[in-house]
Image: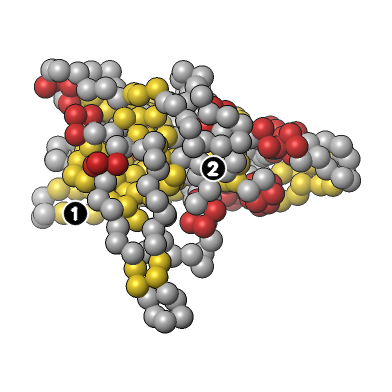
Amino acid sequence: MANDVSDTNVTYVPENKALASSLDWIRDYRIKIYHHTQAVSTNSKNAQSYYQEFAKEKNTDKVLDVSDLRVQFQIRRCAMYYPNQAVISIYNLSAETENSIIQEGYRVIVEAGYKNGICGQIFDGTVIMYTRAKVNGTDFVLNILAIDGDQFLNEGFCSFTYAKGQTARQVVNNICNKASSPVSLGYASPSLDKIVMSKGGAVYGQPKKTLADIAKTINGTWFIDNGKLYMFSYSDSANKVPSPYNRPSAVELNPLTGLLGNPQQVNYGVQARCLLNPKLTPYGLIHIASKYITEQMAQIGSYSQGITFPYTLDPNGIYRICSITFTGDTRGNEWYSDITAVDQGGNVMSMLTNPSYTAN
C-alpha cells in the first residue's frame, strides 16, 4: 500500500478486464434532457435569479430520452480549474420536440459504455445555450452546450463568516452548504485539517475564488465533477483518494482492454487514447505498461535554453488523469476517450495550471 509520504510504491487493483466474448464492445448509451412542462416563475425581476430558478428541477418536469436518434457528443472533464463541459448534437428532432427543448430544457445527462455492464454516467450538466443548423442539405441538428456545476461555479454566491481556529475543511464545507446554489462535497484533502485560521474572516462573493485560494494554500487543485466538489492536495497519498475498493485502484489500459495505438510521452506525462470508458475520471488512476508508450526525445533549444528532457515515465506505470475527453457518435465510428495524465503523485499538475507554462 502507499504510505502517507510518497506514492512511488503504490499498489493498485486492476480494473477494466476484458472478457473473452467479442460482444463485450457492443455500445450502450442513454442521453436524457430534462425540461420543464410548466412556466418558471420567480418573484424577482433579476435575470440571474430567474436563471437560477430555471435550472432547478421541478416535480412536474419531464425527461426526454433522445437515445434512439443520432447523437454526437464531445465531453471534457478536467481536474485543473476548468469546468467540465459538453457539446452535444442531436439530429432530426421533430419541430415540436426541438422547440420544447430550446424553450424549457435545462439539464442534460449522458450515460455511455457497453452492454457488458461497463456503462455509466459520463456527464451531468446545466444547459448554457442552444444553436440549430442544417448539415448535408438534409439533416437538422440541435447543438447543446452544457457545463457541469454551472450554477455553483458561475451563478453561485456565498456570504458567511468564520471564526478564529476554524479549519479550511470547515470553510470548504460551509461553501458547499451555504452557496446560493449548493453542491455536495465529494472529497476533501486531509491537508485541509492542518490549515487553521489564525483570525476570523468572511467569505463573500463567488465561491470559486475562495476555493482557488484554499487549493493554492494546500498546493492542490479543486474541481466540480458530476455535481460534486473535489479538492485534492498534490501530496495526498493515493490510498487516501476515494475508490470503490477503499484502496488504490487504476483502470488497466492495454490492447485487450481498449487501448488504441501507442500512448505518447510528452514533457509532463503521457497522452493516450482508448475506447470510451466511463470508469475514467478526473484525478483518477490509470495503469499503462511502459512497453506500450512511445518515449519522447529531448528537445534542443537555443544556447540560453539548453536541452529540455521530458519527465521520466512512472516506474510502476501508474498515472494520474488531468483531463479526459469523451467523443462519441451513436451512428458513427467515434467512441473513444482521450487522456492527458501525469505521474501518479500529480505534482506536475501545478505547472499545467500555470498560464506561462507550455507543455510542448
Mark 1 or mark 2, which has the lower sequence index? 1
Classify residue 343 as left or right of residue 24: right
Identify the coloring: secondary structure
Q: Residue at the location (29% across, 37% down)? A: 289
Whether tag 1 and tag 2 are in contact, CB under 8 A, the answer is no
Label 1, on which residue? 134
What separation in Å lies between label 1 and label 2 (alpha carbons)? 36 Å
Nearest the viewer among 293 and 226 is 293
Task: Judge whether 199 appears above or below 7 on screen.
Answer: below
Q: Measured from the top left, where is residue 216 in percent x and y?
A: 65, 51
Query: Secondary structure under badge 1?
Result: strand
Query: Secondary structure under badge 2?
Result: strand
Q: Measured from the top left, where is residue 137 in percent x and y?
A: 10, 55
Label 2, on which residue? 223
Q: Residue at the location (74% across, 34% down)? A: 193
Q: Residue at the location (28% across, 18% down)? A: 117
